[in-house]
Amino acid sequence: MDHLERLAPGGLIYLEMMDPEHPLIAPTLATRASGYQPASGKWSRSVVDSGAPDFVTMANKGWFDLSREGGLFGAAREFLVATETHEGDWWWARVRLAESWDIMGAGSAAALGSGFGAPEFAMLSLTGDVIVCGTTGDSSIGTVLVNDFRTLTGLRELANWKAEWRGTPQQERSASRRWLESIGHRGE
């Protein structure tokens, strides 16, 4: 199944794969960004009780509002989403949000999670400075938005470790190095 077919059920129109030489944060690092304490002391998030009868609808609304207000996308509704490449690595696909979409339901069942109502995705703004991740907990689902993640010392240290560790897949090692160089971080 190609990117177009995998992303369409969620209402994402596949535009292109981003050049792997572009200095974007690696998707595997992006999924970890919310695990580091931001300077502001909090993350932006939207959480919905998965026991509510309309939890997917509420989670979709929370994702959209958080993403729009937080800068994931602008009027053109374009952004990047992590997707598995044919080599088995993960990289960023540029997408446009269709008029009709269902990120948390059909999208999570098809490519953006581990099933209907179980989001597990990473999204990145076109400018590369806003991350939105889907989360699934024991009794809730939602989204977390992280901006200004370049300042997260722990995330930069993790990127440096991934760039140097031989067990990291080559594409991810290279992507981590390019991203660190682009933000002016030099390994310790």
Image (cartoon, helix red, strand yellow):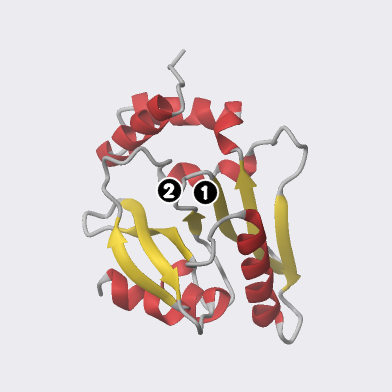
Comparing 40 with 83, the one in front is 40
Q: Position of residue 164 (x, y in %)?
A: 35, 24
Pointer 1: what residue? 31
- Crowding at mark 2 (Cα within 10 Å: few <14, some 14-19, many 20+): many
Vertical relation: 169 (above or below) 120: above
Comparing 82 with 76, the one in front is 76
- Label 1–label 2 contact, CB within 8 A: yes
Please identify the residue farthest to the top as the structure is shown: 188
Label 1 element class: loop
Q: Position of residue 7 (x, y in %)?
A: 38, 73
Vertical relation: 154 (above or below) 97: above
- Crowding at mark 1 (Cα within 10 Å: few <14, some 14-19, many 20+): many
- In this view of the protein, can residue 30 be seen by the observer? yes
**Residue name at image x 39 percent, y 66 percent:** 95
Comparing 139 with 67, the one in front is 67
- In this view of the protein, can residue 110 be seen by the observer? no
Number of labels in the image equals 2
Please identify the residue farthest to the left as the structure is shown: 87
Side of 62 relative to 19 (left or right)? right
Label 2 element class: helix
Q: Position of residue 26 (x, y in %)?
A: 40, 43
Quadrant the N terminus occupies? bottom left
Q: Position of residue 132 (x, y in %)?
A: 57, 55
Give amino acid for label 2: Pro
**Residue name at image x 52 percent, y 62 percent:** 120
Disc assigned to residue 27: 2
